[in-house]
Amino acid sequence: MAALEKMFDVRGKSVIVTGGASGIGQAYAEIMAEHGAKVCIFDLNPAGLEQTVTAIRAAGGDVWGQVVNVGDRAAMAAAFDKVAEKAGSIDVVFANAGIDAGPGFNTPTGERNPEGAIENLPDAHWDKVIEINLTSVYTTIKHAVRHMKPNGGGQIIVTSSIASLINESIVGTPYMPAKAAVNHLVRHMAMELGAYNIRINAILPGPFITNIAGGRLRNPADRKAFEAQSLLGRIGDPEEIKGLALYLASPAASYVTGSLIVIDGGSLLRMT
């Protein structure tokens, strides 16, 4: 048991989780704090951030938060510097912040949806989805590496999606190319950063119950469509991603880098 605890030991590690006030990001923050890491959550939602920080502290976790827009590069640089100054290092970073891309060109029941048609897609919406789901990952990696290199290494875990590997007609068009680019970025960074003892991997969730898209999967029609894709016949709960997150952040994954790890209840198998 002692050997197992050492294998998954993240005690004292300085951890950043972007978009950590709810959903999958909150699960990352909780599991790291539960195992003795010092966690800083970045999120744009002050009320949600305060609520999550309060709950993790009540459970005994060492956690604090910063209200940060991951699309603001100057704010991200300053936020990373603040964590490094407070904690002395940055050891693990979860690049998790993301937004939904809205409805696709089909409805969950298979009808065409004019709102999601490419000719009706506002340019500003495309730009926002790319900014948050792709460019902010670049920014997060950049500043993580800036602090990890002088300290001899670290771990970066990026939240991608199974949407990066398929085309899904009920999901807004910008989402798939953004997440596909994230996958390529992760693998490219693994090639660059391995020499500096920085491991970077991506988690590719299938459908999970979160607040993304205003809690879209709580809508019966949407939920039914995604449940039908799962080989387990249900939507994932963020609690079920905690084990994978801890593994990738811990010494147990010391020889894992550049990997795209799917956690989707078998949805990808059915869809392909």
Image: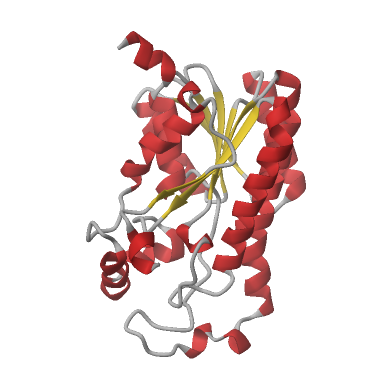
Image quadrant for the N terminus?
Answer: top left
The residue lying at 64 percent from left, 46 percent from top is 187
Name the residue furthest left.
233
User: From where the camera sits, is residue 182 visible?
Assistant: yes
| Left or right of 186 in this view: 7 | left
Q: Quadrant of the C terminus?
A: bottom left
In the rendered view, tell whether residue 116 sits above or below residue 86.
Answer: below
Residue 199 horizontal/vertical position (percent): 61, 32
The answer to whether any part of residue 22 appears in the image is no
In which quadrant of the rendered view does residue 246 lie? top left
Left or right of 114 in this view: 226: left
Choose between 1 and 75: the one closer to the eye: 1
User: What is the number of callouts on the image?
Assistant: 0
- On the picture, is 162 further left or further right than 238? right
**Image spot of residue 188 (x, y percent):** 69, 46
Name which residue lies at 45% across and 65% down: 213
Q: Which residue in the rendered view is the most extreme toward the top?
A: 2
Towards the viewer: 160 or 90: 160
Q: Could you tell me which residue is drawn at 23 percent across and 56 percent down? A: 232
Give the vertical position of 124 relative to 93 (above or below). below
The spot of residue 209 in percent (x, y) is 34, 56
Q: Is residue 197 above or below residue 27?
A: above
